[in-house]
Image: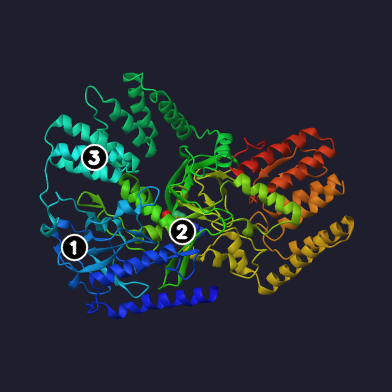
Amino acid sequence: MEDAWAAGLEAQKTILREAERRKGEKPNDLKSREESLRWFSKSVRDAIFGEDTWHPLVRLSFLTPTYPPCTTPLAQLEPITIEDLGLETHHRGRYIALRAITPPLQKDTVVAIAEDVLDRVTILQLCLQEEEGVRTAGDIINVGTVVLVKEPFFKITETGDYALRVDHPSDLIYASELNELYPREWRQDVPTDAKMYKVAGDLAMGNNKYWKAIEAYTNALVSSTDPDAIAIIKRNRSLAYLKTHQFDAALLDSGYPNFGPKPSEKALFRAGEALYSLQRFEECRQVLETLHTEYPQNPLAKPKLERAQNRYVEMDTGVYNFKAMQRDVHDHNAPDLDYATYIGPVEIRESIGKGRGLFLTEYVKAGALILCEKAFARAHVPQTPEPGSITTMLIDPFKDIRHVHGQAELQQMVTQKIYTNPSLASRFTTLHCGTYETVNESVVDETPVVDAFLAHAITWLNMFACPISSLHSHRQDMEEETRQGPTPLSILHGRHSVGIWTHASYLNHSCTSNTRRSFIGDMMIVRATRDLDAGTELSFWYQVPDFQLSPTRGSQQERLQSWGFTCTCAICQDENHTTTATLEERMRIIVGLKRAYFAPTEDKTKTQIIKRQLKALNATYTQPAEDVPRLLVWQSQLELAQLYIKRQKPEKALNAAREFFTSLGYRVVGLDATTSRFEILRWGLFQDRSIQAFFVIYNAFLELQDWQNAKVAAKYAMTAVKVVVGEDDSLGL
Ligand SMILES: C[S@@+](CC[C@H](N)C(=O)[O-])C[C@H]1O[C@@H](n2cnc3c(N)ncnc32)[C@H](O)[C@@H]1O
């Protein structure tokens, strides 16, 4: 099966790569209407029986070479028909009017057969349309739907058929009969009675057909002159927009911010809902306060106002009910949480050699909350897929890149989000896009111009993998570790859903990072991992620098390759200056350390061997650990400390724990025979397992009956927990 799949995929990629040769050709073998309908019926049958793909559990979609969206107003484009379309050609300066003659087939794209005004037919492929839950394929296109495709792209598909492919959502215009570009040939005697359209809209609303309702209300508005009727139609359309997640349009139709002398209850309510969904909590709170004051009998006014107030407080203070957040994720299995974004004391500015970066505007202590950010978009991928569930795969046949799992969905989600809610677009479109060249126009024909390829480039460079909750993964990792011994860090990360967080996206990578990200559902929490001065650039790991897993020179740079930069942090620079012989020597010692740890010898012998080998390992480093944290040392150092605790040697455990922290560049006092209180004078490179190291110290002090120092260790352990799982409120959950 796998071989056949790989061969099938390769064949499709070859068709796409070779298509370019026929660029500009007007094919003389266009399918007739009957042939096209037969092709469509077969495709539907194959889709039903899972025979439309080389692998029944993989849904493939293919990227085409990038091209910009149309930025010419429709009125300045000239019409074209199917027989004049050239293959692999973007028909700049043209538009084509098409009418669907079949219902849609939902594959990786929405597919239908459509005719032009000369009765020729073509396959129409609509890419990156809304998710089925927001808009069904039948609402996107159906028999009789008339669309105008701007600057149509006619191409050879991966199956060798010809299709008109629409990548940019803004290149697709739905034409109503009242639109002057609606082809004359298809015009019927259209009633221009506003009342009739309004009734049609109301009926559609009653049947939960919100897209139809929007179309009918829009037609009603075109032919309405009565201001009262217009206000009512707009309020109704506002609700339809809310139901279809078009919050900008819903807000506009509600009349916000000018509700007039006697604001309507429905207008206030709908404006409140739209503002809430756009996360404009301060304005939302004000509108709902008016609603509550003007219409105290409205049963929803008070709870909705309280909800908006809670979001406002979170946004303003960074104080969250983390326990409730964790409950939402675990008990209610709801990865998309209803909380506000908090942006701590940070600003975006230039970071030399790294583009822009995120910088602190004030001093913060280790563990401080920097960001608690709701995802701009998040594609959920279950950790353990249900048997038989479909994997989506986005293939770039020209660069031979595969984007698996949530990445294809994420691109679709962000593309639709910025198209349907243009006020949110700039948060996303201003993110780093590498070398992708963007178009200048953002609005044409009063519609946002959405570049699907820009969305792809940004998604690729800015997305992060996320577990359903870091608390949950941390517990799983701990259980795994108890059963099997330490797991390499890289295995613990990157098996998750993916998302975009538009503020966190400004953090650059450093292997010597000073913050850590964690997740609760779709909330990303970024905390400082050390005390940091104002003006410090914040960084986190894009990839964990796990030199134990891939010890060869340059392996970390390889892991970072897809972001298109070379890390020049102190650790990476030091690696460049270290001889291959030394790197090999370190790996020999590491192998010896692992062997010693898992050997069936008694703990006393084990500790002696580990101690000796750690000494040899430390001797291979030339730079002080405060400048270059020793990523190959800390893990064995922690194992040594844990062995001493097991052997009830608290002083030795404290000493080994001190060495653990020293190897990561920390400066600590109070873990030796001195009388100083235990204290971290300088924080080093944070590792998740600092939690265990603090617990070693805590247990050692308990054994020594040094309650004061045990308390200090417990406090540090809680800071570490907060950094790793995002919070420390729900430890008892
Ligand atoms: C998520 S964005 C980070 C913000 C980005 N610097 C900007 O200007 O918007 C990722 C991109 O930042 C740059 N970057 C991140 N870390 C870097 C580093 N350590 N050195 C150089 N460039 C880095 C790379 O271009 C990478 O593709």
Circle 3 crowding by C-alpha within 10 Å: few under 14, some 14–19, many from 20: many
Could you tell me which residue is drawn at 53 percent across and 57 percent down? 542
State which quarter of the image contains the N terminus: bottom right
From mark 2 to mark 3, how far is it between C-alphas? 37 Å
Q: Nearer the viewer, mark 2 or mark 3?
A: 3
The residue singled out by tag 3 in the image is 201
Q: Position of residue 430 (x, y in %)?
A: 36, 52
Residue 647, label in figure: none
The residue singled out by tag 1 in the image is 95
State which quarter of the image contains the C terminus: top right
Q: Which of the 4 image quadrants contains residue 622?
A: bottom right
| Tag 3: amino acid | Gly
Q: Is residue 9 left or right of residue 164?
A: right
The residue singled out by tag 2 in the image is 407
Q: Is residue 533 left or right of residue 166?
A: right
**321 or 155: which is nearer to us?**
155
Q: Position of residue 134 (x, y in %)?
A: 37, 47
Circle 2 crowding by C-alpha within 10 Å: few under 14, some 14–19, many from 20: many
Is label 1's Cβ within 8 Å of ligand 1? no
Q: Is residue 558 left or right of residue 611?
A: left
Q: Is residue 672 above or below residue 37?
A: above
Q: Secondary structure at mark 3?
A: helix
Q: Nearer the viewer, mark 1 or mark 3?
A: 3
Q: Secondary structure at mark 2?
A: helix
- Residue 724 shows in this picture: no
Q: Earlier in the sequence, mark 1 or mark 3?
A: 1
- Residue 575 shows in this picture: yes
Q: Earlier in the sequence, mark 1 or mark 2?
A: 1
Q: Earlier in the sequence, mark 2 or mark 3?
A: 3
Could you tell me which residue is drawn at 48 percent across and 33 percent down? 314
